[in-house]
Amino acid sequence: MSTTEANIKIARHNGIVTSISVFMPIWSKTSDHGKLLIQLPLLGIDTIAKDEADSEIAIKEAIQSFCIVAEKFGQGIEIELQALGWIAVDGESGEPLLGYNVEETDELLERLFHTGENYVNPHLEIVA
């Protein structure tokens, strides 16, 4: 059995990604220089913020950049996420929904996911 630790729902209009809904764990810590180092491990992204107030902008921009690059230069968001371990999940609305599942037998990974914060954005606009 597995539990879903993260999910991304992709909204398209005329085949173009317009927004995504995001729920995923993130980790942050303060660097020796006073900057906030933020990790989005399920996307393989690290970013930096000036402070806590700037962290929301840094996270949004990192996710938006991932999506834009995946669509323009990769094989599309869904394929690029699947390459990182995400799996397609049946969504109710017909929009692509991907989840990141962790097997309950993988206690170490399960614990790691619960040590970070959860980033939630129900409507992150993607403007290419």
Image (tube, helix red, strand yellow):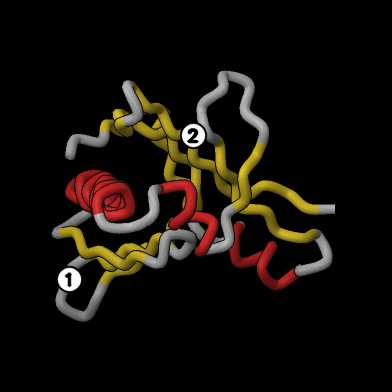
The residue most toward the bottom is 32
Label 2 Cα crowd, 10 Å radius (few <14 / some 14-19 / many 20+): many
Q: Amino acid at mark 1?
A: Gly
Reading the image, the residue beneath label 2 is: 9
Q: Nearer the viewer, residue 59 or 80?
A: 80
Where the C terminus falls, by quadrant? top left
The residue lying at 62 percent from left, 44 percent from top is 88
The residue lying at 31 percent from left, 67 percent from top is 46
The residue lying at 76 percent from left, 69 percent from top is 106
Helix, strand or loop at disc 1? loop
Reading the image, the residue beneath label 1 is: 34
List x then y, in percent, for residue 117: 47, 52
The residue lying at 50 percent from left, 59 percent from top is 116
List x then y, in percent, for residue 85: 58, 61
> Would you say residue 96 is visible in this rendering?
yes
| Residue 55 in the image: above or below residue 13 | below
The residue most toward the top is 93
Q: Quadrant of residue 109?
A: bottom right
Helix, strand or loop at disc 2? strand
Mark linked to residue 66: none
Label 1 Cα crowd, 10 Å radius (few <14 / some 14-19 / many 20+): few
Q: Is residue 81 left or right of residue 105?
A: left
Tag in front: 2 or 1 = 2
Q: Amino acid at mark 2?
A: Lys
Q: Earlier in the sequence, mark 2 or mark 1?
A: 2
Q: Quadrant of residue 97?
A: top right
